[in-house]
Image: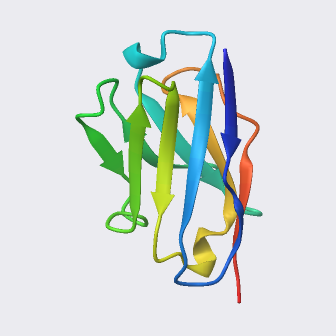
Amino acid sequence: VQLVESGGGLVQPGGSLRLSCAASGFTFRSYTMSWYRQAPTKERELVATIASTGGTTYYASAVKGRFTISRDNTKNTVYLQMNSLKPEDTAVYYCRKWGTDYWGQGTQVTVSS
């Protein structure tokens, strides 16, 4: 199993970023996928999940209405569209195969003026 995140960077408050997580080594279309984040000195927290078919999603209250999780099962990729970014969204964002110990290496998102 391999999960590779990309798309992080530095963005001003109010800006947008789109993260991608390319998956391989398992039947991607059969599994729920998730995004987590970990800010400095804080515990890793769940941001969003998406069911195998994409029909059911979950969002943490801190990001609901601003972030959108989606997936393309033809490309074995899960996305996290992040809008109206705030400084408190600054963190390393990780992709996880839901319910397993398979994580990506993370991508840094920094929201700062």
Q: Please identify the quarter of the rendering in which residue 91 is found.
A: bottom right
| Residue at 66% in and 69% down | 90
Please state the total of marks drawn on the protein image. Answer: 0
The residue lying toward the viewer, choosing from 31 and 45, is 31
Q: Please identify the quarter of the rendering in which residue 11 is found.
A: bottom right
**74 horizontally vs 54: left or right:** right
**112 horizontally vs 21: left or right:** right
In the image, farthest residue toward the bottom: 113
The residue lying toward the viewer, choosing from 104 and 27, is 27
Question: Which percent across, then down, holds residue 74?
Answer: 43, 23
In the image, farthest residue toward the front: 74
| Residue at 62% in and 79% down | 87
Q: Do we see residue 47 in this rendering?
A: yes
In the image, farthest residue toward the top: 26
Question: Which percent across, then down, holds residue 103?
Answer: 66, 30
In the image, farthest residue toward the left: 55
Question: Which percent across, then down, holds residue 8?
Answer: 69, 57
Q: Please identify the quarter of the rendering in which residue 15 is found.
A: bottom right
How is the model colour-coded?
rainbow
Question: Which percent across, then down, holds residue 75?
Answer: 50, 26
| Residue at 71% in and 89% down | 113
| Residue at 34% in and 24% down | 52
Q: Do we see residue 42 in this rendering?
A: no
**61 horizontally vs 1: left or right:** left
Name the quadrant of the N terminus. Answer: top right
Q: Is residue 107 above or below residue 50?
A: below
Q: Is residue 79 above or below residue 60?
A: above
